[in-house]
């Protein structure tokens, strides 16, 4: 029986299913974890410290997880991650309010879990999309994941709203624990693909950088990209909670923003052209800057919602375009696919260090962060990102699609 040309292979479908469930489970509870931690600690500054610590510790998981993936298989890395995630939620459930006193250990567990997961899943996504139209696959992947991210907050908000006091959070954390157990089971059905070169070759980064200057500039761009991501991953849920002060309404607002992300990702998966990556990325960066200006007159309900919808529309376009283009340049390195794990470890390390920067910078302003300083922080991070994109691509005369690309 002849296979349709556009039908995805079994492992590609299973990977989307597994990753989609993971995003669903994460969005059920991790979306609200900062609100939960804020309500327990009653300190916005401590939230900044926790998230900065989490971002700094995550690269440790990437480096160790990348080594495991290289010597054995990326599925080993994923499964270790899932066990760490389940440990994290078990600790949160068992310790309850006591997590504030041991927030450093909780941040370490979460950071290692996230680092291991993305070190494994990004390589797996790279592998299953290698013979496909990567822009199309990443676009479909993002639609799937954003759809999961749409349902997750609604489920989390419903569970949290149905509990007394903070009890609803425990229901959400318990559901996530069960979902991650299911993700672990799905991973058992994905085919293994051990690396052809088992040596961890991070020491070859400088020779690789000299052979492909554009790849080097894109690698540096990940650090600058982290400035804005550090804010967009951390601030929106807290900002919505400040405006509405009810988790169930926050969940609806987050779901609405996910719908916008689905629409923009679907559009780009059909219309986007990789040779115009730098244009898309600059438009997204400066578009968020313009959106941040809406908050300069005050954080009313309407301004806040419009700004978050702008972020939800442009952020996925920026990230999908960037990661597709970065993987394309990675394919051009002398070792080609044999350096893919190292490339993921390098860019995620730089991205996470970049995410920690704005939180550390804003720590002295924690008391005024929700007022005058917030829009300045987003506008500044977006401007720096847009300038960094221009610098990264400024020497590129044109971009030729790789042979067989679509």
Image (spheres, rainbow, N blue to C red):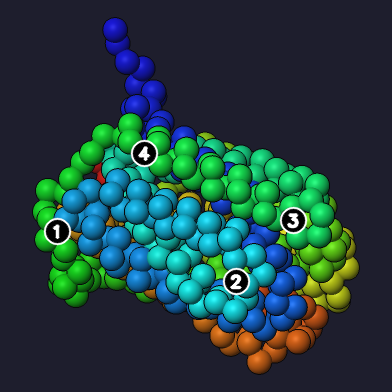
Which residue corresponds to the image point at 62% horizontal and 72% vertical from the top-left? 98
* Residue 164 in view in this figure: yes
How many angstroms separate mark 4 from mark 2 (CA)? 30 Å
> Which of the two marks, 4 or 1, is nearer to us in this view?
4
Tell me the SS state at disc 1: loop
Which residue corresponds to the image point at 23% horizontal and 39% vertical from the top-left? 192
Q: Position of residue 210 (x, y in %)?
A: 19, 73
* 156 relative to 116 in the view: left or right: right
> Which of the two marks, 1 or 3, is nearer to us in this view?
3
Considering only order in the chain, which callout, 3 or 1, is on the residue closer to the N terminus? 3
Residue 334 is marked as 1
Q: Position of residue 19 (x, y in %)?
A: 46, 43
Which residue corresponds to the image point at 70% horizontal and 55% vertical from the top-left? 169
Residue annotated with mark 4 = 187
Q: Residues within 10 Å of mark 3 (few under 14, many from 20)?
A: some
How many angstroms separate mark 1 from mark 3 (CA)? 54 Å
Callout 4–callout 3 Cβ contact below 8 Å: no
* 231 relative to 8 in the view: left or right: right
Residue annotated with mark 2 = 99
Considering only order in the chain, which callout, 2 or 3, is on the residue closer to the N terminus? 2
How many angstroms separate mark 3 from mark 2 (CA)? 15 Å
Question: Up-down: is 383 above or below 400?
Answer: below
Which residue corresponds to the image point at 20% horizontal and 56% vertical from the top-left? 70
Residue annotated with mark 3 = 167
- Which quarter of the figure is the N terminus placed in? top left
Residue at far front of view: 94
How many circles with numbers are drawn on the protein?
A: 4
> Which of the two marks, 4 or 3, is nearer to us in this view?
3
């Amino acid at each position: 029986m002849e296979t349709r040309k556009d039908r995805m292979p079994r492992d590609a479908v299973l990977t989307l299913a597994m990753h989609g469930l993971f995003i669903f489970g994460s969005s059920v509870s991790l979306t609200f974890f900062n609100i939960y931690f804020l309500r327990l600690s009653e300190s916005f500054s401590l939230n900044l410290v926790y998230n900065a610590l989490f971002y700094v510790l995550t690269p440790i998981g990437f480096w160790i997880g990348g080594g495991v993936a290289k010597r054995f298989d990326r599925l080993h890395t994923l499964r270790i991650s899932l066990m760490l995630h389940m440990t994290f939620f078990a600790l949160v459930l068992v310790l309850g309010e006591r997590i504030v006193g041991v927030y450093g250990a909780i941040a370490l567990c979460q950071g290692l879990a996230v680092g291991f997961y993305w070190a494994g899943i990004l390589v797996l996504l790279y592998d299953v999309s290698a013979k496909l139209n990567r822009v199309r696959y990443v676009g479909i992947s993002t639609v799937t994941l954003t759809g999961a991210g749409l349902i997750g907050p609604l489920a989390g908000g419903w569970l949290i709203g149905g509990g007394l006091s903070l009890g609803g959070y425990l229901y959400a954390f318990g559901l996530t624990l069960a979902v991650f157990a299911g993700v672990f089971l799905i991973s058992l059905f994905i085919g293994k693909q051990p690396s052809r070169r088992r040596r961890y070759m991070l020491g070859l980064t400088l020779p690789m950088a000299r052979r492909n200057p554009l790849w080097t500039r894109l690698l540096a761009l990940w650090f600058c990209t982290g400035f804005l991501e550090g804010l967009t991953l951390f601030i929106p849920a807290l900002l919505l909670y400040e405006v509405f002060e009810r988790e169930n309404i926050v969940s609806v607002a987050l779901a609405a923003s996910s719908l916008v992300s689905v629409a923009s990702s679907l559009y780009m998966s059909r219309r986007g052209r990789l040779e115009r990556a730098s244009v898309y990325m600059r438009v997204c960066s400066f578009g968020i800057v313009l959106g941040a200006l809406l908050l300069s007159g005050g954080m009313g309900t309407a301004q806040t919602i419009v700004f978050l919808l702008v972020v939800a529309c442009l952020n996925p376009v920026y990230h999908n375009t960037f990661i597709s283009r970065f993987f394309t340049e990675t394919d051009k390195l002398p070792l080609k696919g044999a350096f893919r794990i190292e490339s993921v470890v390098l860019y995620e390390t730089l991205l996470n260090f970049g995410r920690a920067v704005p939180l550390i910078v804003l720590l002295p302003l924690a008391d005024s962060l929700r007022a005058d300083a917030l829009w300045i922080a987003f506008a500044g991070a977006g401007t720096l990102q847009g300038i960094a994109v221009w610098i990264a691509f400024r020497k590129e005369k044109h971009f030729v699609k790789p042979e067989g690309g679509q």
